[in-house]
Amino acid sequence: MRNITNHHRGDVAVAHAVIFGSAARDIGPHRERRRCLPCVGVMIHQTIPLSRDYNDAVKGHLGLATRVPVRRLEIRLGKMSTVDFFDLNSIGSDSHLQFMNWAADNNAAYDYAADTRGYTYGLVMEYYDKNWAARFGEMPMPTVANGIKLDWDLARARGENFEVELHPSAFPKRQSVIRLLSFINHANMGSYREAIDGYLSGKDPVPNIIEYREQGRVKYGFGLNLEQKLTAMWRVYGRAGWNDGRNESFAYTEVDRQVSFGSDLRGRAWRRKNDRAGVAVMINAISGDHRRYLALGGLGFLLGDGALNYGLEQIIEAYYTAHLWRGVYIAARRATYLESRLQSRPRAGDRGQFQFPFRGQRTFCEGRQRIALN
């Protein structure tokens, strides 16, 4: 990671230029063979103070300041991952050290703007106040579903994201977070209904959504993201997501409806303060048009086997992450698919993580919200 920093205090804006290498959500939904490692992030970050009061902050690859104004405007421009800023959850957003299933790492119904590696370019603007924040992001969409090339004509293809983050005082001295998300994607999408009609009329031998793509089509959706600290060692979270499911899934998953919930427990109770254990339940579904398209033999960029029988996808995932030494962690993970007809069944697996501390500070969350373990 290479950082170029310029700090000014008081009422003067603080600017950062950050270049960071490949991180986890590793290379997006579909990996692509390359001879060299791509640069996945180049970003200009401007912070405009709006108050004289400051809070402590943890340095990371998306922010270098150790203190930030309580009230501030942050502007970022460059190559980034949309979910480094939207739909974050400190219990379920880090595929390195927490859950690995896509439906636990993010809202599976959030078809956020991204290329096949999970990255895009964009502008993100965030306003922070004492107990709430709001953010907006504008990003180009890929030219085709799950494509590597982005469409730079924002008049016809773009992803618009808006999120409000609230920090109510639900429990004394226990952090509560509520995030309300909405998104609207404009892209060269195919219509499930038109593909179905083309097949039933005899025009097409099988439903083929690619033949019914049209510039300017829209997919929109909403998300609810909750997290609650119950004790010093125990936290719970939940997500719910919905998108209209009329036009083709384009960038993340083919899920149109989702509910997930889970918790994590810190290892201090068994004298392993830097260890964590977690469990999550995920329930995924698709829209009526999407379901019928797949049942008639249609294919999406992730789903379809010639005639897919529909059923809710129900998953339970558990993990244990153990701290070995300094920034070295090892983890074991097990996923059980109670009912899975939306995607292939990945096997249970183990993983190792080498998390290098910055100036002795151990952290437990990849991305913008870095949660200190000490």
Image (tube, rainbow, N blue to C red):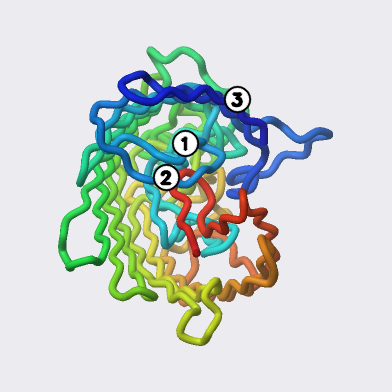
- What distance separates the C-alpha of mark 2 from that of mark 3? 18 Å
Q: How crowded is mark 1: few (under 14 residues within 10 Å), some or many (20 or more)?
A: some
Mark 3 in CB contact with mark 1 (< 8 angstroms): no
Q: Which disc number belongs to residue 57?
A: 2
> Would residue 35 be seen by someone viewing this image from the given angle?
yes
The foreground one among 308 and 115 is 115
- The numbered mark, 2 or 1, whose residue comes first in the sequence reads 2
82 lies above or below 166: above
Identify the residue position indicated by label 1 in the image: 65
SS at badge 3? strand
Q: Which of 221 and 145 is in front in this view?
A: 221
> Residue at the bottom extreme?
270
Q: Nearer the viewer, residue 171 or 326?
A: 326
Report if the CB atoms under discs 2 and 1 are less than 8 Å apart.
Answer: yes
Looking at the picture, how far across and down is residue 340, in whole percent? Answer: 49, 68
Say left or right for 248 vs 300: left
Q: Which residue corresponds to mark 3? A: 4
Q: Identify the residue at the far right of this view.
A: 35
Which of disc 3 and disc 2 is earlier in sequence? 3
